[in-house]
Image (cartoon, rainbow, N blue to C red):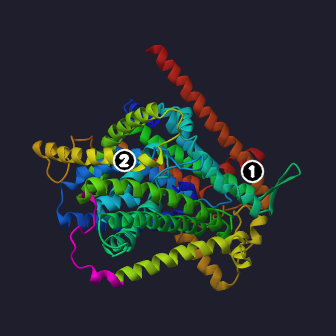
Amino acid sequence: MQKALAELSEMDELAARKSPVHALHPAAKLLTTIAYILITLSFDKYDLSGIIPMVLWPVLMYQISGVELRTCFYKLRIVLPLVMAVGLFNPLFDKEIMLTIGGVGVSGGVISMITLMLKGVFCLMVSFLLMATTKIDSLCAALRKLHVPAMMVSLLQLTYRYVGVMTEELAVMTDAYHLRAPGQKGIHISAWGSFLGQLLLRSMDRAQELYASMLLRGYHDHFHYADIERFKLRDALFMAGCILFFILLRYGNIAQLLGGLVIR
Amino acid sequence: MHMADALLAPAVAATMYVASASAAGVSIHKLKKDDEPSKLPVMAVTSALVFAGQMINYTIPGTGSSGHMCGGMMLSALLGPYAGFLSMIVILAIQCLFFADGGLMALGANCWNMAFYGCFVGYFLIWRPIMNGKWFGEGKSAERARIIAASIIGCVVTLQLGAFSVVLETSLSGITELPFGAFCALMQPIHLAIGLVEGLITAAVLVFVHDSRPELLSGVELSEEGSAKRSLKTVVAILAIVALVVGGGLSLLASGNPDGLEWALFGNADGGYSTNMGLDEENFGVSSGAADKAESIQEKTSFLPDYAFPGSESAAGTTVSGIVGSAIVAGVAILICLAGGFFRKRKMKTE
């Protein structure tokens, strides 16, 4: 649980850095990320050579933003195997040979497995990049600008604020519990209800106080944001350029073009 | 059960987004109509708590393992289905954004699989009918028994539905070669066990809340006003639940051995794929005038055509240049990394 806390604060620290990517408008980054994921997912499951050039954009962005690729992969170590696992079955079921490299046949299943894994890795890379370069507050403000309902956005912001508080509180409780029950793994069944229940009741009361204090500070219906930067020409250019680049990669196979240049 | 982006085709992801967004829209509308602004902080704090609570290990007695909870049922029992649904969406969004648990594009599908069933199906078809029914007689202990029954049945059923949806969405996306039946056989039993444990944990927490602060539970009538009107609904709900449980059980038995039709439908890629890497359209598919025309229209309009590179000659030629080109791309990517590192070092020196 302490680990989760550390990860959260690490993300906040990353997002608070300064770089050309950090300085972009959050809405531009969000939309570009979504476009990237959509286009990556739209590749055919056997289109391995088409999908490989998609790696260029995240790699370039990581370098410009100064976020280390290592941090990303360290963070994704738990999630990646799950994505991989689904593709693992493909070679077993799709055994038709699609190409031969040096006498070794490669089946369609292997190609679709690798394509699937790459898709997973690329999508995770760009989502991580988005969060590592954007503060949650500015992301929420951007969501509001994109007309996501105020209630959802406020809820997201408030919940994010309290995730840290609650995790810390539960971490303290778990520590206390384990100190009094040495050598026991997890929470015993006799305490299943009361352990979380106690905190739940306390939190419900806390929420009432929170609401009272919100009202005292003039809360009405939704939160107000300090003006975030305006959507500048730079942001529009970034978005348009990136999306054009993705479309180019999608409809013109860069890998084949490059390979053709060298081979012929 | 969090799905990653790679498991979904854009069309399926978009459909699930639309479905979840409409459910969220209805929920927001309902909450606004009820005009309960004070609910916002309660929702936020409770969902933060559930988020943290998911990290606790609960020891399962008699076994060495431990269980976790997911919280959809619990949130809707505490906050009501609409607020519960919104809270679950937020939890899933935070998991996806900050912990890379489930993808950005898959968020719609994840909300549907985990939040929609848990909150709406779980609440309207299971929690409310059972809590307002006459099961186990009258009195406090009967109420407690009803809570336990509702939580366990609710969690098992909603998790089965969710797991089935995962299988369905992945299969529709055409991502995995795993036959539909085999995939079901993999997912449903695992989630049966998870659902049972989750149900027990949910029951324990809700019983505790019921004992100390019963007014916090949503949809529970504490007064003895007439529940006779509901009896028919209760019966229908119970029947539906039984059908689902039995169906789930049967599907476990049946799908252990995937049948030929499913194999043919999902397992077996078209023979045409073998000669080309999906780059060459001419070699497979039906060829008639109408089909060609339809294909050309589809090619122009579709976001996901079976992409064909103009001027690609033989299958062998395209593959080789594809491989070489990919290697070049990889080289460029590494170069970018090196260049980034170089500039950063220089900047550090100048600073």
Q: CA distance from mark 1 to mark 2?
A: 64 Å
Q: Could you tell whether A95 is left or right of B65 in the image?
A: right
Q: Residue at x 50, y 41 (%)?
A: A186
Q: Which mark is residue A90?
A: none
**Residue B225 occupies which quadrant of the picture?**
bottom left
Magenta-colored stretch includes residue A63: no
Observer able to see residue A57: yes
> What x and y, as percent, mark residue B184?
62, 67
Q: Camera-side residue: A153 or B255?
A: B255
Magenta-colored stretch includes residue B219: yes
Q: Are marks 1 and 2 on the same chain?
A: no
> What x and y, as percent, mark residue A170?
38, 39
The residue singled out by tag 1 in the image is B321
Magenta part, dominant SS: loop
Q: Could you tell whether B145 is left or right of A207 in the image?
A: right
The residue singled out by tag 2 in the image is A194
Residues rendered magenta in the picture: B216-232
> What x and y, as percent, mark residue B26?
29, 68
